Image: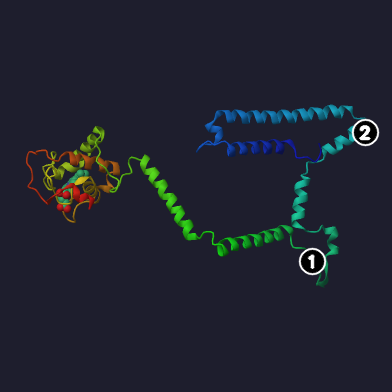
Amino acid sequence: MKNMTPWWIRIPVVFFIVFGLMEYFVDSGDKPAFIAYPIVSGFLVLVLLILIATELIVRSIENVMFQTLPEEAKQKYLEDDSKKFEWKWGKRVYSKLLGSKSIEEEHEIILDHNYDGIQELDNNLPPWWVYLFYAGIIFAVVYLARFHVFNDYDQILEYEQEVAAAKIEIEEYKKTAKGLVDVNTVEVLTDAADIKAGKKIYSTSCVACHIADGGGGIGPNLTDEYWLLGGGIKNVFNTISEGGRDGKGMVAWKQILKPLERAQVASYVLTLQGTTPAAPKEPQGEIWTPEEESK
Ligand code: HEC
């Protein structure tokens, strides 16, 4: 059991390999597998226990075997065992990759000149560097062939694919996010709750100019079929978002009201169509017909 990696490296390494494999193979959506499926956590705990148990068993076997050794073998064993843990394998690889000679061997590679006591060693290129260099050459050849000879794909295509994928994601997101309406996607809301919310917004923000029943004051009459800036949900939503013509007094509400709120108040404004206000303002603008919206 000497010169092996100690238990405090062995157990975590094996455990995390098992853990990684579980995460890789168990399809658990956004969440990590051990959270999505409690049984996976259970399994991992079991794995950990088995690893610890194995360690303990190996220990005790070692111990039993130790007791059977003759006295001097015992001494030797203890001596070896008390040596500090060295990770020989790691050290060997490290010095291989460095490719340097130990000080005792330096006389083999010393160059034949000496400037005021300064000498030069003819070291090999470090293998880690050389391998990296070869790998670079192979990569370059494959890259050249793939992209410049066979024209696999180019940056523009890559860009377009990413943009397309992002657009699909945005559409998916918009479907689930109700508050994310814009002038292109807005539709008349008919839910009583939405109309009620719209009415509330209207009575706090809009009555000052359009009067509670929509009959009009500073702002135009919202109950008739005449529109200055176009009727229909899209135009009304747009007017509310972007405001009226410059200097007329209708501000852009997009800074103040959220998209959903604008859709709600727009829908509420449309419910005023055809009602009879107490003091209607004279019609302004033109009669608006729905066909125009498709223009
Ligand atoms: C400060 C006064 C004022 C307030 C407050 C106001 N408006 Fe207006 N609104 C106007 C004026 C003035 C116009 C006409 C704009 C133009 O002629 O370009 C207008 C136009 C409109 C129109 C277009 C009417 C048409 O004939 O095309 C709609 C819809 C509208 N307002 C809705 C609202 C809503 C909803 C609110 C509250 C969120 C609101 N307004 C708040 C003054 C106001």
Residue kind at label 1, given as amino acid type: Asp
Q: Nearer the viewer, mark 1 or mark 2?
A: 1
Q: Pick whichever, 263 or 84, lies toward us.
A: 263
Q: Which residue is located at x 17 percent, y 56 percent? A: 247
Q: Earlier in the sequence, mark 1 or mark 2?
A: 2
Q: Position of residue 224 (x, y in %)?
A: 11, 44
User: Compared to 283, does 212 lie above or below?
Assistant: above
Which residue is at a point 92% across and 30% down the rendered structure image?
Answer: 71
- What is the spatial separation of the Cα atoms under label 1 and label 2, in whole angstroms? 48 Å
Amino acid of disc 2: Glu
> Is label 1 within 8 A of ligand 1 (CB to nearest ligand atom)?
no
Q: Which residue is mark 2?
A: 72
* Left or right: 79, with 274 as reference point: right
Q: Check whether the beta carbons of the residues at disc 1 and disc 2 lie within 8 A of each other.
A: no
Which quadrant, please, contains the N terminus?
top right
Residue 41: where, in percent of width, then height?
59, 30
Picture coordinates of residue 84, whole percent (x, y): 79, 41
Q: Secondary structure at mark 1?
A: loop
**Left or right, 45 with reference to 242:** right
Color encoding of the figure: rainbow
Residue wearing tag 1: 122
Q: Residue at x 47, y 58 (%)?
A: 157
Res. 258 visible in picture: no
Residue 34 visible somewhere in the drawing: yes
11 horizontally vs 170: left or right: right
> Alpha-carbon neighbours of circle 1 within 10 Å: few (<14), some, or many (≥20)?
few
Is 230 placed left or right of 80 in the picture? Answer: left
